[in-house]
Image: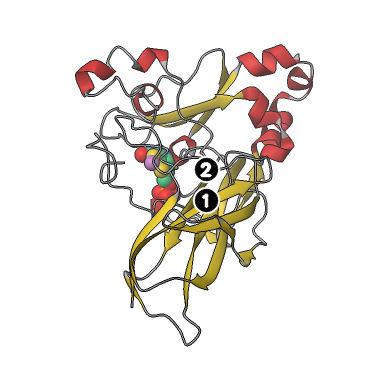
Amino acid sequence: MRTKIKEVNGIDWGEGAVMNCAWTGVRLVDLLSHVFGSQLADLSLEQRRSKHVAFACRSVATQDDDWYGSSIVLERALHRDADVLLAFQQNHLPLTPEHGSPVRLIVPGIAGARSVKWLDSITIQDHECQNFYMQRDYKILPPQAEDTEQAKEWWDKVEPLMEMPVNSVVVADQTMERDAEGLVEVGGYALPGGDGGPVVKVEVRVDDGEWVEVQTLQQGGGKWAWVLWRWKGEVESGKHTIWSRATDYAGHRQDCERSEWNLRGIAYNGYGEAEVEVV
Ligand SMILES: Nc1nc2c(c(=O)[nH]1)N[C@H]1C(S)=C(S)[C@@H](COP(=O)(O)O)O[C@H]1N2
Ligand SMILES: [Mo]
């Protein structure tokens, strides 16, 4: 967002702020059912939607608060298919300290900020978690909030970022040689939006040409995973922009070259975009 639209008050995420790996643990719903049993089973749908499960790590202070925390609505936590996990292994190895050992939360499809590491308490409560990172950060503020002063009037009016948007990225060398048939090859990754996975289609466009579906879409990681894709096509010599857009199973599709600016520079999901020179 900073490089393509305008300055943001945030980190240069680039296109690498993504995690795709195998998590092993216990489903949160199983733990909650074990502890609360019929108390939970007897809740009405309305109660499940109005209560929150809050997660905290009080043992380590953070930059802007003296603890870290997040919450999700109880209904999502109790929904088996949502796969909310108390994880203790990453890629079949014990969690490392950096990634939250001994146990962390994983909420697939939802912003990583909610997946509390070094988890030390879980609470069912009537209100959202009040931690700084839930209430004063990781929110898609409207574009009128142009600086931290103007942001103040918005924090309480905007919901915390939860579901991540469908996305895709083009990975290409800056200079590419056409092969004997005049073709060049690019690749990338694509991610589903929220719980709408898996990605079912990726399309590529050269400059303002037609969208063409990619030939190779690697599957296998399931509903929450990224897909890796490759496309080979004819491109004239010269400078070009190669665009990509992804569509997931639920029908979410990237729908613009540049997504709308927000102060924190989060949830960018304009088309994947790479400037290349073909020789
Ligand atoms: N306790 C604690 N948990 C945390 C954080 C934190 O600062 N403290 N950062 C969150 C954010 S913003 C992200 S993006 C993920 C990053 O997880 P990773 O370090 O395993 O990539 O952890 C989340 N969990
Ligand atoms: Mo983050």
Left or right: where 21 falls relative to 155 = right
Find ligand 2 in the image and state its quadrant. top left
Is residue 118 at least partly visible in the picture?
A: no
Q: Which residue is mark 2?
A: 254
Label located before the other in sequence (2 or 1): 1
Tag 2 and tag 1, C-beta contact below 8 Å: yes
**Kind of residue at badge 2:** Gln
Give residue 141's quadrant in the image.
Answer: top left
Looking at the rendered image, the quarter that the C terminus falls into is: bottom left
Viewer-proximal residue, 22 or 3?
Answer: 3
User: Secondary structure beneath disc 1?
Assistant: strand
Residue 262, given in percent of the width and then of the height, sits at 33, 30
Taking the spot 52% from the left edge, 71% from the top edge, the residue there is 233
Nearest to the observer: residue 213 or residue 126: 213
Q: Quadrant of residue 220?
A: bottom right
Q: Is residue 186 above or below residue 106?
A: below
Q: Secondary structure at mark 2?
A: loop
Residue 46, above or below 166:
above
Q: Which residue is mark 1?
A: 245
Q: Is residue 60 left or right of residue 267?
A: left
The answer to whether mark 1 is within 8 Å of ligand 2 is no
